[in-house]
Amino acid sequence: MEVVVECAKCECCGLVEDCTRDYILGVRAAFSGRWLCGLCSEAVRDEAARGTARGAAAAAGLEEALRDHMAFCGKCRRSPAFRVADGMRQMLRRCSK
């Protein structure tokens, strides 16, 4: 039996990995239909575990951790020009206060 390998792109950081179809489906089942690379999935699980320890429901904690991690990765993936413009905007706001 031949194992079929597919490329999957992380919806958080954009990393592309070669994985089997079963693995991709398992990861998507664990993260509400989204595919996450190994590093992002561990970060989300760790943050969700902290949320559960603080008293949040497990499902709500995972969704919140996933949303927060995706927002964090989105900030890190911005283009350098956008980051400079965003930095200038923040600096002008601080100066105008």
Image (tube, rainbow, N blue to C red):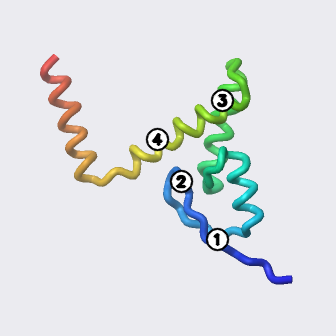
Badge 2 vs badge 4, beta-carbon distance below 8 Å: no
Badge 1 vs badge 4, beta-carbon distance below 8 Å: no
Return the disc, 3 or 4, that comes first in the chain's sequence: 3
**Quarter of the view holding residue 25:** bottom right
**19 sits to left or right of 89:** right
The three-letter amino acid code for the residue at tag 1 is Asp
**9 sits to left or right of 50:** left
Residue indicated by mark 2: 11
Where's residue 31, x and y in %? 67, 45
Residue indicated by mark 3: 61
- Circle 2 Cα neighbour tier, 10 Å, few/some/many (<14 / 14–19 / ≥20): some
Return the disc, 2 or 1, that comes first in the chain's sequence: 2
Residue indicated by mark 4: 72
The three-letter amino acid code for the residue at tag 3 is Gly
- Circle 1 Cα neighbour tier, 10 Å, few/some/many (<14 / 14–19 / ≥20): few
Return the disc, 3 or 1, that comes first in the chain's sequence: 1
The three-letter amino acid code for the residue at tag 4 is Phe
Image height of 47 relative to 40, above or below? above
Q: CA distance from mark 3 to mark 4?
A: 16 Å
Where's residue 40, x and y in %? 59, 49
- Circle 4 Cα neighbour tier, 10 Å, few/some/many (<14 / 14–19 / ≥20): few
Check disc 3 and report its element: helix, strand or loop. Answer: helix
Image height of 15 relative to 67, above or below? below
Return the disc, 2 or 3, that comes first in the chain's sequence: 2
Badge 2 vs badge 1, beta-carbon distance below 8 Å: no
Check disc 4 and report its element: helix, strand or loop. Answer: helix
Q: CA distance from mark 2 to mark 1?
A: 15 Å
Where's residue 53, x and y in %? 72, 23
Residue indicated by mark 1: 18
